[in-house]
Amino acid sequence: MSSVTRPRRGTDFSRFPSSIPIVIDNGASTFRIGWAGEMGPRATFRNVVQRPRHRATGETVSIVGDTDPALMKFFDCTRSAVRSPFDDDVVYQFEYMEYILDYGFDRLGATSEVGHPILMTECECNPSFSRARMAELLFETYGVPSIAFGIDNAFSYKYNQKLGNCGEDGLAISCEHGTCHVVPFLKGQPVLGACCRTNVGGFHITDFLRQLLSLKYPYHTANFTWEKAEELKKEHCYVARDYMSELQIFKNNKEEAEEKTRYWQLPWVPPPKEEPPSEEELARKAASKEKAGQRLRDIAAGKRAKKIVDLEKQLSDLEELMDQLDEAEESEATAILVKNKFLSQQDVKSAILKATQSLRKAKGESNADEEKADASAADRYPLVSVPDEELTPEQLKEKKKQIFLKTTTEGKLRAKQRRAEEEALREKEEEKRRTENPELYLEELRARYSELSEKFEQRKRQKVNGGHTNGNHGSSGGVGRGERLNAAQKERMRLLTSAAFDRGKGEDTFGQRDEDWLVYNKMSKDNDDDRNDDDESELVRIASKLQEIDPTFVSKSEAVQVTPEPPKFRPLTAEDYRIAIGIERFRCPEVLFQPGMIGIDQAGIDEMVSISLRRLMEDESVKQRLCQSILLTGGCSLLPGMIPRLESGIRQYRPYLSPLKIVRAADPILDAWRGAAAFAASSKFGKQTFSLADYREHGENLFHRYNIVYSL
């Protein structure tokens, strides 16, 4: 880790004459700086800047290059991020570039002034405004006497040409950190008008690998840092010669796919083994469970007792109100009804009947005496027995309504009487079964209770949102009313629709016959309510019997909702911390040939060669000569399988049996700096520089007509 603060201090360059140039390979990934004529740079570090705060002092510190994790714990990096001065191999953040140059010159031992010429590399066709800002920074801030700029690919190609790896005519394919370039060379000079560029490079391979592993292992995302993904890329990734065939291997051939899969074991500590509980622990848990069960039973009994007391008080108040109404006069009775929020004495009688039924259900008693309460309903229909000749037209209409109600009431009474008889017979049979086989009888009661409880739960769910989604899977309550209706309710809606359709076609004589009450019974909501009441009464009756037979039984309606325990996850093993890198090994480098895989609509590096050759206005013999000397350089060229895949891809765009030769640079990482250092030490370097005086005389216009170092 390296920190830089201004102003800079250090030793000067006294041991190096001021005429010796400083060579800077300003790559998007790595910054290299050294002296001309040497075989390697003096300082090499990542071309990034980070400005965290010190945890103790709160001071902001500038960190340039690689970071040491052991020292980074003393800094707060939550509000700072790693910044690069580059965007697609073009410098645009010169504030960060200044921090990087500060540190680079400090590593060489610079004072406040740098009195040496500078040779700096840049990418092909670098914008003139970027070159102008860089020159301004070097002249104004560091006092550099003269500057020269050159293309890194050209330096690498010329350096390998001296080593005999390529000829004067050829192609340079550079796969760098953020971009890939193809530059043709004719007679040793780059033809920039025919060069080709794609904004895909090693950074995109690393980032794609990090994304794939994060999606594959979402619980270990924090371990997939960019630095770790870069390390995995360099260690395990390779370029497939035939991408589709390689995919088929991982799809069909499990043995060969397993051989090509690499594993990365994350740190894992085995959890402590759980010992089986002792007898004392089991006894304690059993006692705790029994205590909890008893508490639930007490709560249920308390709820039931409170409900009975409330219903008895409500019934007593209603009966007292009814006595007051019977003794009061008509005007006083009306005031009493309004005060108690009732419309008539009949409403009070209905409330007394409902309270009585609820009280019987709470006590588990039978409602066999309901007919007596309903028997007085016949007094409410005085016009039924009166002949039609003695009634007025309004009374005839009222008589028709009373016929409806009387017929329905009598039908209900007969049905309830029949059910009471069936219930008495069933009680005798159940008592007989209970005497013969108590265990079997208890199991039958539990099964019947579970069946009725499930029916009630299903009915509740159907009322809330039905059994379907009506196609609205993502909306809340997205169901229609028709989907919440059961079969009886749908039949009622059909009958109501038919009755409305037939209305007005003739004289309305419906209800004059006794069988008409059957249709009314189907259309009446009370029919469903009666069934619901029967099921509810049956559920209460069975619950009461279960409580008599089994003291530990607690009904679902009275049980306290206990918060469910969270699901117990299985303990993680070493296998869960084992990261498998299989298809990702060749899928990530494939973006160099298929940038569309990561959403970049540009050509791959094999197609770029064809595009660059088409831009050359030369005959086919010149193109064949260029293809016989293709130099592959850049960090991505070190991926295994790169040359065979690139050769097979280029042949698809070349004539059949056309000669083709691809070689890798002697050192794809350092050849650009070494070529620049060799040129800076030659006599040609002085002719390619422009001085501080030229800059002050011409300003930025100088860079628009400045020729980059081409003639090496």
Image: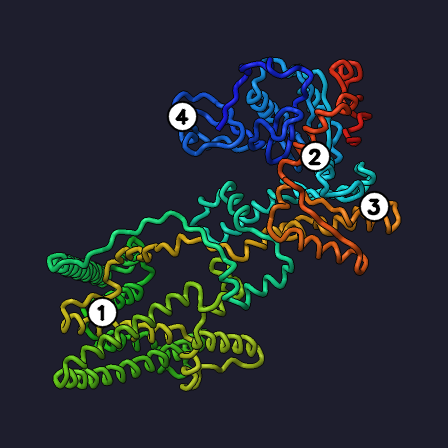
Residue depicted at x 45% and y 32%:
68
Mark 2 packing: few (<14 Cα in 10 Å), some, or many (20+)?
many
Nearest to N terminus: mark 1 or mark 4? 4
x then y, percent, for residue 521:
40, 79
Nearest to N terminus: mark 2 or mark 4? 4
- Which residue is under mark 3? 615
Badge number at residue 55: 4
Could you say which quadrant of the image residue 166 lies in? Answer: top right
Residue depicted at x 20% and y 69%:
360
Badge number at residue 128: none
Per the model, the C-alpha gap separating discs 2 and 3 is: 22 Å
Closer to the camera in the image, 203 or 530: 203
Closer to the camera in the image, 497 or 148: 148
Nearest to N terminus: mark 2 or mark 3? 2
Badge number at residue 152: 2
- Which residue is under mark 1? 361
* Residue type at the position of mark 1: Lys
Observer-side mark, 2 or 4, equals: 2
